[in-house]
Amino acid sequence: MFNKTHGKKALAAILSMTMILSVAACGKTDGNTNDDAQSEVSYEKIEANDAATESTTEEAAADEAYVLPDDMYFSELTGEPISKDIQDQRPIAAMVDNELTALPHYGTAQADVVYELMNSTKNDRITRLMCVVKDWNNVEQLGSIRSTRPTNILLASEWNAILCHDGGPYHNDAYFAKDWAKDHLSGVFSRVNNGKKREFTEYILSGDMNSQIEKYNISATYNEFANEGSHFNFVPYGTEINLDEKYDRSYTANKVSLPFKHNGSTLTYNAETGMYEYSEYGEPHEDEDSGEVLAFKNVILQKCSFTQLDENGYLIYNCIGSGENAWYLTNGVAKDITWVKSSETAVTKFYDENGEELQINTGKTYIALIPDDTWDKVIFE
């Protein structure tokens, strides 16, 4: 079902000059080069060692290719093997409250992709999470669930996901009126007595999705608006891309601090696990159900302008367009890239300076839309 290009499994060879990387991006790019767009950057540049690359390439070639079991397929969300039983099942995109009062979160560690977006221009530009989950039948509790914004409707459409939320501003109405956005569920999930105010008590519990999609006659399987194939350009399962070997220009990224003032989001690379661990409000984000720290193999940061819709702080990101800057982080290394989203339902694609679609590692992905007016406040260490 999925066409994948072939990557190489390689070990990083590093020539280091230790400094802090502070991103200061300038304007739009043409999608082929980011030299000007990523200027004014102090960084630890990583250069590939040819001998090490040749050696590890030979090792990779000697590795046996992964044999996919007959009852499994490669997930369109993560590139990892999962059961064919849910191959045609639509994911859900659940709006999860990210206010301090809403913590701890439940079920977020089971998300395949997590978006973090500014939810309002007020309250120090508070963010909200959108958790994209393929195997939602295995989630016991997810949330708490809160309202959605127009940008989330556009992003959920890329996955043909069932958007799960609790209301939202009237600015959503024009989008929900469109055929591709009609399949959403609002305010119909379970209430949990957690001692908090009512707005912090709604969760998707086991069985909720099946009962509600049946009640509202929503298809649980992909419909005519679904995009074909894998969402990302994954390397073959069992291999990894190392950005410092593939590209002449890459940057050390053991930690990234995002300009989300309200909650202070950071992602820190754990060399033992090969994952970026998410923290906010000064603490590691732990899922209350599993105790797992929310962690990702891939981190994508998109520079994106936005339009404030009214005096209440409601907004929409201008997420349809091309040539804007972005960063891709994996294995402690960052690469400057660009992004393209051609229409409301089109998949956002990412490209390197050669104009080639970016390859990313298999696994979970975190995506943040960074407002363009704070893009220069993204800090790598």
Image (cartoon, grey):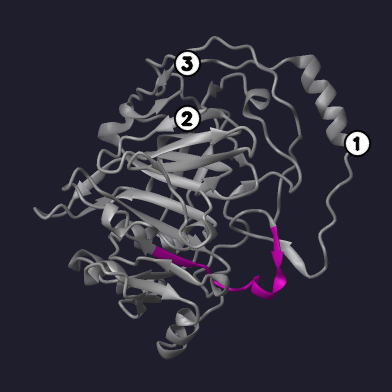
Relative horizontal placement of residue 357, taking residue 379 as reference (left or right): right
Q: Based on the displayed image, in which of its 4 quarters is residue 145 positioned?
A: bottom left
Q: Across the whole image, how many numbered discs are drawn on residues?
A: 3
Query: First in sequence: mark 3 or mark 1?
Result: 3
In the picture, the disc for residue 43 is 3
Dot 3: element: loop
The verdict on residue 52 being magenta is no
Gap in Å between the C-alphas at discs 3 and 1? Answer: 35 Å
Relative horizontal placement of residue 340, taking residue 311 as reference (left or right): right
Q: Residue 300: x percent and y percent?
A: 48, 40
Is 281 above or below relative to 213?
above
Is 118 above or below relative to 17?
below
Q: Residue 76: x percent and y percent?
A: 62, 59
Gap in Å between the C-alphas at discs 3 and 2? Answer: 13 Å
Callout 3: 10 Å neighbours few (<14), some, many (20+)? Answer: many
Q: Nearer the viewer, mark 3 or mark 2?
A: 2
Q: Is residue 102 visible?
A: yes
Callout 1: 10 Å neighbours few (<14), some, many (20+)? Answer: few
Magenta region: which residues? 81-94
Question: Which residue is located at x 31 percent, y 35 percent?
Answer: 259
In the picture, the disc for residue 255 is 2
Dot 2: element: strand
Q: For mark 1, what is the residue?
A: 62
Q: Nearer the viewer, residue 158 or 19?
A: 19
Amino acid carrying label 2: it is Lys
Q: Quadrant of the N terminus?
A: bottom right
Among all residues in the image, which is located at the extreme top?
17
Is 350 above or below relative to 68?
above
Question: Which residue is located at x 42 percent, y 73 percent?
Answer: 204
Q: Nearer the viewer, residue 264 or 29?
A: 264
